[in-house]
Image (cartoon, rainbow, N blue to C red):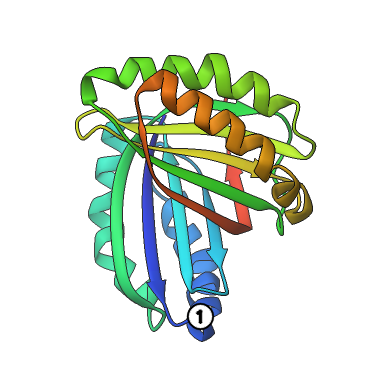
Amino acid sequence: MFVRAVYATGDPALLDTAVRSLNSEGRDLLEERPGYRGAGVFADRELGKLLAVSWWESEEARRHSDEVMRERRGALLEPFAGTVAVANYEAAVVHQVRAPQQGGGLRITRMEFDPRDTDLVIDTFRATVVPRAESLPGLARATLLVDRERGRAMAGTLFVDRASLAASRGSVATVRHEASAKAHVDVVGLEEFEVVYADVRVE
C-alpha cells in the first residue's frame, strides 16, 4: 500500500475545528476516491499538531486522489493550520495485532538514511522491531513507511490507550537504539499523538 501524510501545526485552541472537518467532509471525500484503503487522524492538543494519514492500494490511486484533496485541503484545515506539509510514502511494513481505538496513542519516529540502505531499514524493522514490539502491552499496530527516493521513513507504534503508550517508552527507546545502529539510520524526530480515529484495511 501507499500513504499520504499531512502534517499541520497551528493554534491548539482551533485544532478541534480541523478535526471535525477531517472526520466528516474530509473522510467523505477520501471514501469517494478509487483505491482508498483507510485513514487515520492523530492530534497533539497541547502543542497544536495534527497528523492525517490516508492509505491507498496503489501509487496511482494515491496520486489521483491528491488532485482532488490538494484543492480542498486548505478549507478543511481552516482556521487551525498555520503550516501544512505533505509527504508520500510506501507502506513497507504493516503489522496489526488488534484494532486501534479512539483515545489511544501513537508514537512516530522520523528517520533519515542513505537511500541505498532502504531495504536494510525495512529488513531491520521487520526482524528486530516487530518481534520486540509484539510483546508490548496494548500494542495495536506497528508500521514502517518509507520514501525510497529521499531516504526518509516514519515508524509508527500505535497503542490502544495512552497508558500503554507511556509505559512503552523505555522499552521502545532500547529497541530504537539497537535498530537504528543496525540499519544505519539517523533518528531526526520523535512525537506522540492521541488517536482521533484510525481505520485502515491492512489485508
**Residue 104 image position (x, y, % from top left):** 70, 53
Residue located at (51% from left, 31% from top): 177
The tally of labels here is 1
Task: Give left or right: position of 122 versus 23.
Answer: left
The quadrant in which residue 171 appears is top right
Task: Give left or right: position of 105 versus 75.
Answer: right
**Residue 185 image position (x, y, % from top left):** 35, 30
Check the image and report above or below for 9 versus 140: below
Q: Quadrant of the C terminus?
A: top right
Check the image and report above or below for 86 versus 11: above
- Are there few (<14), some (14-19), or many (20+) residues within 10 Å of tag 1? some
Residue located at (49% from left, 24% from top): 179
Residue located at (52% from left, 24% from top): 178
**Residue 65 image position (x, y, % from top left):** 31, 48
Viewer-side residue, 65 vs 133: 133
Q: Which residue is mark 1?
A: 12
- The amino acid type, in three-letter code, at marker 1 is Pro
Residue located at (22% from left, 18% from top): 116
Viewer-side residue, 113 vs 153: 113
The quadrant in which residue 172 appears is top right
Q: Quadrant of the N terminus?
A: top left
